[in-house]
Amino acid sequence: MQTTIYYSDNDAYLMSQVDSKARRERRSRSAVILSVLEEYFEREKRLGEILIDLGAVSHASLAKGLELQKTKFTEKLLGEILLEEDLVSRDALEQALTIQGRNGREAS
């Protein structure tokens, strides 16, 4: 996927911040912009919501996982349950946990 971003002279400060962050993290400008957008949109979300946003789990599967967590596996994390019940792939779960972790939240 390719995206073009147009910005004006008024945005120069923000772009310099992006470029500075990209140099520090040894990432591309695009990668930094996408990570900032991801954090903004996923900041307040829980693991299940992130998985749904990624298209990794259906609402029905998430509801099943939450019900199992409430009734049968009360000591397990939702991600573990979804994985054990084969409701989500390991890769998708790891991606969602990475997003959640980057946003300063504990995996739940």
Image (spheres, rainbow, N blue to C red):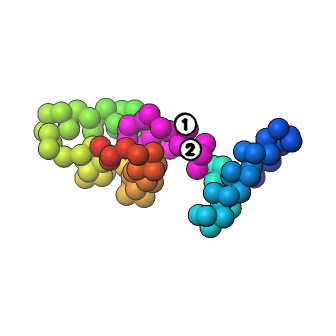
Q: Residue furthest bottom?
A: 26
The kind of secondary structure the magenta stretch mainly shows is helix
Q: Horizontal placement of 49 versus 1: left or right?
A: left
Q: What is the number of the mark on residue 38?
A: 2
Residue 9, picture quadrant: top right
Q: Is residue 87 visible?
A: no
Q: Which residue is mark 1?
A: 41
Q: Where are the magenta residues, as a range?
A: 35-56
Towards the viewer: 57 or 1: 1
Q: Is residue 23 above or below residue 44?
A: below
Q: CA gap, disc 2 to disc 1?
A: 5 Å
Label 1: which secondary element: helix
Figure quadrant of residue 38: top right
User: Against 38, is 66 above or below?
Assistant: above
Amino acid on which the number 1 mark rests in the picture: Phe
> In the picture, which quadrant includes the C terminus?
top left
The amino acid on which the numbered mark 2 sits, given as a three-letter code, is Glu
Q: Residue at x 27, y 39 (%)?
A: 65
Dot 2 lies on which element?
A: helix
Label 2 with label 1: CB-CB less than 8 Å: yes
Q: Residue at x 62, y 67 (%)?
A: 26
The image shows residue 87 at horizontal and vertical percentages of: 34, 46
